[in-house]
DNA sequence: TTGTATGCGTTATCAG
DNA sequence: CTGATAACGCATACAA
């Protein structure tokens, strides 16, 4: 329609500077009236690059699917990439098969969440030399392990409680299986270290180790209350647990933040919406998505501006209603 | 390596029944030791089908991104499809450009959320004859409009309040722009109709029309309380508003569910985790994702089992702590 | 600056 | 049942 060869059209679209203004206009004209959209499969085949990043998010408890994916996606879109998502809880979708499917789709790089790092996985990943990153894992393991300084997170919680005057505290901790265990463990170690440093006592009788969940939090706080300890504050591993604990307190006519302080890490966003406000340590999940995208695109030789995404956690005291108690 | 032609390999992989057992084994053997994964781009090019569904979720207020996408994704994965996601809030990502990008990627079908249905959009959609579905829109508009019976939802709220004996109620309603406005409007009409039918009075002085959000809910309830009306219950359009309203009650030392009943629609999941439990009308968002996937795959000629996904809403009374008041 | 020709890795058609 | 061969629609090296 523009009276030019296919090659010229191709160049007009992907490298306009190589084409004279006149022909380019003619081509664009035709493109518009025809509503022409280049065939991505053919382009991928020819260029051996799909401009697509795969993300496979294996099901696990409190995975921050939504925030993480949002962060990753917006980063990629800005650079002209798209996100191929595999987050299925369907039966038989294993680590390996999900990965295989991604590779078959021809993704340029892969973001992983909740992977066991099995031999098979490692094998297929290395065989295809696809850039990949493990999200929410231990950043000390290397460049493609994107994650938080969990020990620091734990420390922040204790420091905050210490400043408020708490001396005897309890812990409701959530069990997480698999490779993500580390983040739970690290955070707890940070907790313990800081408690030692600051002269805070973690009463074993006020510590519960349980599954994650609202119900579990409620049960846990009940048990702790039954044990009649002297704790003035409880650290919860996740906001699910914390909200359950709050509810448990209410049910026994105690007021969170007054009779017993609760501080928690918020993996999710909803802990912002409870009353009385929970003291939460905000984890930068969305930013983790940014950082993952940033890393992968850099691996692909994309020009990336300086890494401005800090993964520092941020303490957000949401105690606008009642202050945490001062035990003195 | 298996001493066969490429054609045979292709068949061994995608149509095993056409191949003798012996050669098939030989091929599989080679596939395994080689770690061979077929090139999806080439396959797509040859078959003119990508086995990929695009979802473009335009940013808007309380979109249930996460649940909706999860539902859609699990449906697709079960049928061997994958999800190409575009949910960016990046600048300049318009309805049209997002759609274009999807088409360029060669998706077989498209799921839309939050679309204005502009002329351009319609044009490109019809030009490419790609099966598509509008999620969370008015199901009365046709087969590819997947959504809820919002009028019924409104009615359910009123019926429930009526059964509990409420006679004078208020409403905190959330404004949503764009084409999704309908769901808000429909729901409200259902509310009004049912109120008329059941002899319930919606006091204008206890009605607030506002943006969605936690803060907005808090302000709204404050205003309503200031107006000193006789309402015994408030219907909130979304759980964001409801949680804000709850908080507002607490701040004025009133107890939700005792001094004033609150009922809300829960678009999100977190309203399950508050105290005292909110009476909520659970909206089947995830199921909407299922249904969308079901519809699109059927358009693509996929064998689908009978449609078992009901989009009926479900009233979930979470009043395990304190009952709604009986105003008699 | 533009046209031509070849290759990208499959699937599908058609013989054998 | 299997092998050759021609699309599939684009990018690119090379020629003009």
Image (cartoon, coloured by chain):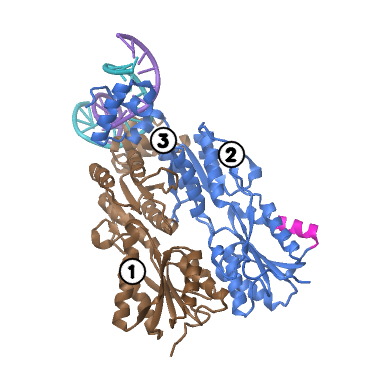
Chain colours: A brown, B blue, C purple, D cyan
Mark 1–mark 2 Cα distance, whole angstroms, equals 46 Å
What residue is pinned by disc 3? B50
Vertical arrangement, residue A213 with respect to residue A256, above or below: above
At numbered mark 1, what does the secondary structure look like: helix, strand or loop?
helix
Which x, y percent locates residue A191?
A: 33, 74
CB atoms of marks 1 and 3 within 8 Å = no
Q: Residue visible at 45% across and 63% down?
A: A268
What quarter of the picture does the N terminus of chain B occupy? top left
Does the magenta run of residues contain B191? yes
User: Which region is colored magenta?
Assistant: B188-199
State which mark lies toward you, 2 or 3.
2
**Secondary element at image label 3:** loop
Distance CA(mark 2)–CA(mark 3): 24 Å
Please tell me which of labels 2 and 3 falls first in the chain.
3
B33 left or right of B221? left
User: Front-most of B99 and A275?
Assistant: A275
Q: Position of residue B161 (x, y in %)?
A: 72, 63
Label of residue B307 in the image: 2
**Which residue sits furthest front?**
A227
Quick check: B76 left or right of B25? right
Which residue is disc 1 drawn over?
A: A187
Q: Residue at x 56, y 68 (%)?
A: B274
Query: Which subunit holds the residue at mark 2?
Result: B
Q: Residue at x 47, y 63 (%)?
A: A213
Provide the chain ID for the residue under circle 3.
Answer: B
A179 horizontally vs B137: left or right: left
């Amino acid at each position: 329609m523009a009276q030019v060869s296919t090659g010229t059209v191709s160049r007009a679209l992907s490298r306009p500077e190589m084409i004279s203004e006149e022909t380019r206009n003619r081509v664009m004209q035709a493109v518009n009236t025809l509503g022409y959209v280049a065939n991505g499969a053919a382009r991928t085949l020819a260029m051996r690059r799909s401009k697509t990043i795969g993300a496979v998010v294996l099901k696990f408890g409190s995975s921050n699917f939504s925030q993480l994916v949002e962060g990753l996606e917006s980063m990629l879109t800005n650079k002209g990439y798209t996100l191929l998502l595999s987050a299925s809880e369907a039966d038989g979708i294993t680590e390996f098969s999900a990965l295989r499917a991604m590779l078959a789709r021809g993704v340029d790089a892969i973001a992983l969440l909740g992977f066991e790092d099995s031999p098979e996985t490692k094998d297929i990943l290395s065989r295809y030399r696809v850039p990949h990153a493990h999200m929410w894992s231990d950043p000390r393991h290397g460049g493609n392990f994107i994650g938080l300084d969990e020990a620091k997170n734990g420390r922040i919680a204790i420091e905050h409680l210490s400043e408020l005057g708490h001396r005897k505290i309890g812990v409701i901790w959530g069990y997480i299986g698999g490779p993500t265990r580390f983040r739970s463990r690290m955070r707890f170690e940070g907790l313990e270290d800081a408690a030692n440093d600051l002269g805070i006592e973690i009463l074993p009788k006020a510590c519960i180790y349980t599954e994650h969940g609202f119900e579990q939090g409620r049960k846990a706080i009940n048990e702790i209350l039954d044990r009649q300890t002297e704790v003035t504050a409880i650290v919860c591993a996740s906001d699910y647990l914390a909200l359950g604990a709050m509810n448990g307190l209410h049910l026994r006519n105690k007021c969170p933040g007054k009779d017993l302080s609760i501080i928690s890490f918020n993996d999710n966003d909803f802990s912002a919406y409870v009353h009385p406000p929970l003291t939460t340590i905000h984890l930068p999940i969305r930013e983790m998505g940014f950082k993952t995208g940033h890393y992968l695109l850099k691996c692909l030789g994309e020009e990336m501006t300086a890494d401005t995404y800090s993964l520092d956690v941020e303490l957000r005291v949401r105690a606008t209603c009642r202050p945490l108690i001062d035990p003195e």
